[in-house]
Image (cartoon, rainbow, N blue to C red):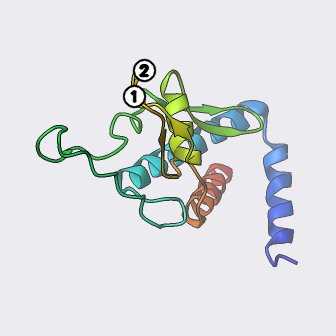
């Protein structure tokens, strides 16, 4: 049995006692903090468990000259594509719009076509969103800070 189970039960009771407006504010704050931590982790090119992302595949010799000088997922991790939402019951961080499909391909390591005319490519699994121990600690800190105010 988890030694923190009684603490978690009391914390759940305190959260349930909050007004819907206060819960919505708290979940919105949690979602924003989670988005920030996810963006920083994607910038470091790490999976939620701390392992580095799989490297890009080498490009064919007849392709562009030089190397790719930008990091993976630079646009994807911006606030424009990575949205947050806080409701009474949940804090949500998600990709929106057309990038959602691309993010899913990389998240799950699926097969996709880079453009309309190319052959299908099997992408390596690069988890963009996920929960780590640091995220769990961050959420509990936000909850405790919110309950103190």
User: What residue occupies the far left of the structure in this picture?
Assistant: 65
- Depth check: 37 or 100 in front? 100
Q: What element carries label 1?
A: loop
Q: What element carries label 2?
A: loop
Residue 32 seen in the current view: no
Residue 15 position within the rendered picture, expressed as x and y whole percent measured from the top left = 78, 48
Query: Is 133 drawn above or below residue 42 in the view shown?
Result: below
Residue 146 position within the rendered picture, expressed as x and y whole percent measured from the top left = 63, 49
Picture mark count:
2
x 59%, y 45%: residue: 30
Q: How crowded is mark 1: few (under 14 residues within 10 Å), some or many (20 or more)?
A: few
Question: In the shown orientation, is residue 15 left or right of residue 143?
Answer: right
Residue holding disc 2? 116
Question: In the shown orientation, is residue 79 left or right of residue 28?
Answer: left
> Dividing the picture into quarters, in which one does residue 79 lie?
top left
> Dividing the picture into quarters, in which one does residue 133 lie?
bottom right
- Depth check: 98 or 95 in front? 98
- Depth check: 33 or 67 in front? 67
x 86%, y 61%: residue: 9
User: In which quadrant of the rendered image does the N terminus lie?
Assistant: bottom right
Q: Give me the disc on residue 118.
A: 1
Residue 82 seen in the current view: yes
Query: Is 13 drawn above or below residue 120 in the view shown?
Result: below
Is label 1 in contact with label 2 (beta carbons under 8 Å)?
A: yes
x 54%, y 30%: residue: 100
x 33%, y 39%: residue: 74
Residue 98 position within the rendered picture, expressed as x and y whole percent measured from the top left = 50, 22
């Amino acid at each position: 049995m988890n030694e923190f189970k009684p603490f978690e039960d009391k914390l759940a009771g305190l959260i349930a006692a909050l007004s819907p407006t206060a819960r919505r504010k708290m979940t919105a704050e949690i979602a924003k903090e989670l988005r920030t931590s996810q963006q920083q982790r994607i910038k470091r090119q790490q999976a939620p468990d701390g392992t580095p992302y799989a490297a890009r595949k080498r490009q064919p010799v007849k392709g562009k000259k030089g190397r790719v000088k930008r990091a993976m997922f630079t646009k994807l991790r911006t606030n424009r594509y990575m949205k947050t939402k806080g409701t009474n019951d949940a804090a949500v961080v998600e990709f929106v719009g057309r990038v959602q499909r691309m993010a899913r391909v990389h998240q799950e390591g699926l097969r996709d076509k880079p453009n309309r005319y190319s052959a299908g490519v099997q992408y390596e699994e690069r988890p963009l969103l996920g929960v780590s121990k640091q995220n769990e600690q961050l959420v509990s800190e936000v909850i405790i800070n919110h309950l103190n105010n």
